[in-house]
Image (tube, rainbow, N blue to C red):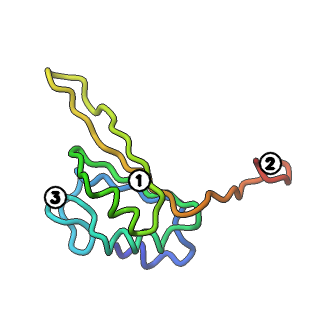
Amino acid sequence: NDALRKNKEGWQALVIDADGTLPQPGVTDRGGIPHSSFLHRAHSSLKEGGLLAISFSAEHRTFERKVQRAGFDVVREVVPTSHKGKQKQRSTIWLARKGAYEQTRTHRGFPHK
């Protein structure tokens, strides 16, 4: 949370494992779901074309709309996290992009396309 405020240049990517952290005031609720205010701060701190990735073991139906309201284009993928046991465990990953991706790397002086 403080790192978002301190970096004046902006971030290219932010990755959040919502299952792997304890609730953090101003960031996540008791269920590990990021607050709307945090999503808006994340959007403001990302560079244009930056990516926010968030992972949950449970699927939260309203979360996608919450991320969109913060200004992101978002897609959701459900991926296996364990193949052991009778019930396969899955994790939902949201990939949220801020605006258009800007290519900044060059190869021999020419921008990549």
Label 2 element class: strand
Q: Residue at x 23, y 66 (%)?
A: 28
In this view, the residue in front, 64 or 38, is 64
Q: In which quarter of the image is the N terminus?
A: bottom left
Q: Residue furthest right?
A: 109
Label 3 element class: loop
x, y (%) of residue 64?
34, 56
Crowding near pointer 1: few (<14 within 10 Å), some, many (20+)? some
Crowding near pointer 2: few (<14 within 10 Å), some, many (20+)? few
Q: State the separation of the CA atoms marked 3 and 1.
A: 17 Å
Q: State the separation of the CA atoms marked 3 and 2.
A: 45 Å
x, y (%) of residue 56?
26, 48
Crowding near pointer 3: few (<14 within 10 Å), some, many (20+)? few
x, y (%) of residue 54?
35, 53
Q: Which residue is drawn at 38% across and 46% down?
A: 76
Which of the labelled discs sits on residue 82, or is there none? none
Please identify the quarter of the rendering in which residue 52 is found. Answer: bottom left
Q: What residue type is labelled 1?
A: Ala
Q: Which residue is drawn at 25% across and 52% down?
A: 61
Q: What residue type is labelled 2?
A: His
Q: Mark 2 points at which residue?
A: 107
Q: Which amino acid does label 3 sit on?
A: Gly
Q: Mark 1 points at which residue?
A: 53
In this view, the residue in front, 21 or 103, is 103
Q: Name the residue under label 3.
A: 31
Contact (Cβ within 8 Å) of mark 3 with mark 2? no
Q: Which of marks 3 and 1 is nearer the N terminus?
A: 3
